[in-house]
Image: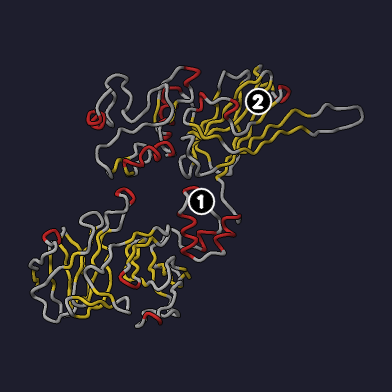
Amino acid sequence: MGCRRCVGELAPNPCKKCEQPAWLPPSNRSGPRLPPSNRSGAMVKCVGCQSLVASTESYKHYIACPHGPCGCTEAINTGCSFTGPPRELLVHLQASHSIPVFTFQYGIPAWCIVRLPVQPRGHLFIGSGEEDGSVFAITVGALGPTTIVSCVCIRSAACLFPMYKAQLLVIGPPAPATAGTSDLSTDTLMAVIEPTSSPTPSSIMLQQLTSFLAVPPRYAKQNGGQRVLPICVCINKKVFTEGPLEVLISQCDAITAASLVGSSKSILQSAKYSATLPASQPFGLPCVLCCDPADKPWAVFKEDLPVHSKCKLLPLDRFSYDGLMPHGKDEERAGANGDWIAMVGPEGKWNLLNVYTHRKIKLPSLRNKLETTHNPLIFEYQRSAIRLQKIAICQVPTAARGYQDFSLVAIFDFAIAYLHGEYPREWIFLENQFQYGAIYCDAIIHNGLVFAVTELGNVYAWDPNQFGNISSLSFLYT
């Protein structure tokens, strides 16, 4: 037992008691365990795939990581307690158990020889995929006089992708010759199965196998006084062809299709390995989101505002894709950053909207600071009319902070307003004693300061933490 701080400092050093790596589970448990973190939103490195994951999502990642800890295939036969990632398991099998490890190519058949009778749980063929380094074991067991053959992918049982299929083939002896015939036909057993995913293949039970090939005793052959069973194995990586997902996405616009793919990790992996989707959709490419040129951009009067729905996704190296924006009536796009866009509507109702997940964050009202007009872009401030130029999303909201850690700067022609999602959760107008008629055109947040530039090239800076209900001085940079 240990406190969180001690356990956190221990990883990845060996445990003082069992001398196993600290991120590994006890030998009588399955599935990895990760030391908890005292900091919300902290990033930790996966020991298997070396990727950085949030501490709040680390357990989900570890139980599904294809490079997570796996047990030795010889655990039942020799009592070996080794545990490590699949790539280290291959080195261990060669060095400690003198088991040959083969590197195979997907789609290329390979023959292996089983010596009969088999051990309580034999693993005669340990193969590593040449393309992705996946590790497979051909599991052989006895069920009475019948030999059971199956294929196991050595990885976490919760790992779903990539998906594979294994073809197992056994050729039987020639048929008995009959008088007056020369029949040379033979019986053949073949099974096409989906390999079972397991981090501990030595302890897997018959009922846990997705499928297996049952071989009768008469298929065994004699080889120098030893009964053997030749088995042909061919492993293929599963590639998704035209199916329901592809048909559905082909009927959707680019944003709706991306929303569908991004809604589920399984669907995302299916699209990633699809034979048709990657060539027809800009998944994973940086795109510029803009208004449809055929659509009406900005309207002057409220009654002229159209219900904007069309937009364009512009990848950097492909033609544009049509999209439909998920927003309501009389709303306009005023700024964007990543997957988030700022929407402005009538009566000072502003929102942040995620293009793909459709998550909407309602922003504080401006009506206690400004007087609204019939035009949602024009307001009355200190007895003067000001017009909204854009909304700069300087910090996008994140799930780790409950979507409340965003920072926005509203840029008007003669005013600058700042908003932070957590505190004080209200718009703060940044006064400027230096500005005399210059029009603001853009703004950013850097090192906690708000910087705004005018059309004349002047740059002004404010510390928003010094602002409240009273005004404060700004700094002029020229």
**Label 1: which residue?**
267
Which amino acid type corresponds to the residue marked 1 in the rendered image?
Ile
Q: Provide the residue designation for mark 2.
A: 229
Report the disc number at residue 186. Answer: none
Q: Quadrant of the N terminus?
A: top left
Q: Of helix, strand and loop, which one carries label 2? A: strand
Q: Position of residue 274 (x, y in %)?
A: 54, 54
- Relative image position of residue 35 (x, y in whole percent): 30, 32
Residue at the spot x=47%, y=50% of the render?
264
Residue 425 % position (x, y): 23, 58
Callout 1 crowding tier (Cα within 10 Å): few <14, some 14–19, many ≥20: some
Distance Cα–Cα, label 2 vs label 1: 40 Å
Viewer-proximal residue among 477 and 297: 297
Specify whether 337 is left or right of 179: left
Of residues 52 and 385, the one nearer the viewer is 385
Amino acid type assigned to the residue bearing label 2 in the image:
Leu
* Left or right: residue 250 compared with residue 199: right
Residue 9's place in the image compared with 223, above or below, is below
Helix or strand or loop: what does disc 1 sit on? helix
211 sits to left or right of 284: right
Q: Cβ–Cβ below 8 Å for labels 2 and 1?
A: no
**Closer to the observer: label 2 or label 1?**
1
Residue drawn where x is 11% and y is 80% of the image: 436
Considering depth in this image, is 184 or 142 the residue closer to the camera?
Answer: 142
